[in-house]
Image (cartoon, rainbow, N blue to C red):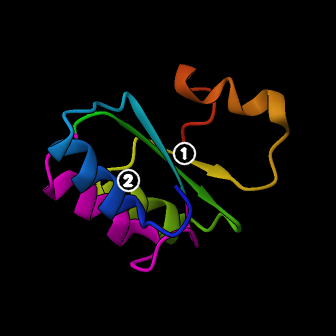
């Protein structure tokens, strides 16, 4: 939904009784940015799978995403076929 943040979309999904099994976030796709978006989604009650896609993988950044509630962190420039393997755990960072 262009023009909406991930948090706004999730809040709307609660109102409309729409459930998401998985949320994939780009680190620059939300005004909150990064791990704060993950934390806000968890604070709002989202219990599903969250994959955060980041441009540069740095250990401190990875740990912050996982600490805030992301299930996986993936590099932005992965090959298309790699994305299908993410939920299987093949790109776990910790």
Q: Tag 1's secondary structure?
A: loop
In magenta stretch: residue 90 = no
Mark 2 or 1 closer to N-term?
2
Percent of width and height locating residue 57: 66, 63
Circle 1 packing at 10 Å, graded few (<14), some (14-19), many (20+), is: some
Specify the segment rendered in magenta: 26-46
Percent of width and height locating residue 20: 35, 32
The quarter holding residue 77 reads bottom right
The quarter holding residue 26 reads bottom right
Placement of 52 over or under 19, stated as above or below:
below
The quarter holding residue 35 reads bottom left
Q: State the residue position of label 2.
A: 66
Residue at (38% x, 53% y) in the render: 66
Most extreme residue toward the right is: 79
> Quick check: 17 left or right of 93?
left
Residue at (15% x, 54% y) in the render: 44
Q: CA distance from mark 2 to mark 1?
A: 9 Å
Q: Which mark is residue 93?
A: 1
Circle 2 packing at 10 Å, graded few (<14), some (14-19), many (20+), is: many
């Amino acid at each position: 939904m262009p023009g909406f943040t991930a948090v706004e979309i999730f809040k709307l999904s609660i109102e409309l009784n729409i459930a998401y099994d998985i949320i994939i976030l780009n680190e620059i796709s939300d005004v909150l940015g990064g791990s704060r978006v993950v934390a806000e989604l968890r604070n709002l009650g989202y219990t599903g799978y969250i994959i955060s896609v980041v441009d540069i993988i740095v250990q401190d950044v990875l740990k912050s995403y996982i600490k805030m509630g992301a299930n996986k962190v993936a590099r932005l420039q992965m090959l298309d076929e790699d994305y299908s393997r993410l939920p299987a755990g093949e790109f776990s960072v910790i």
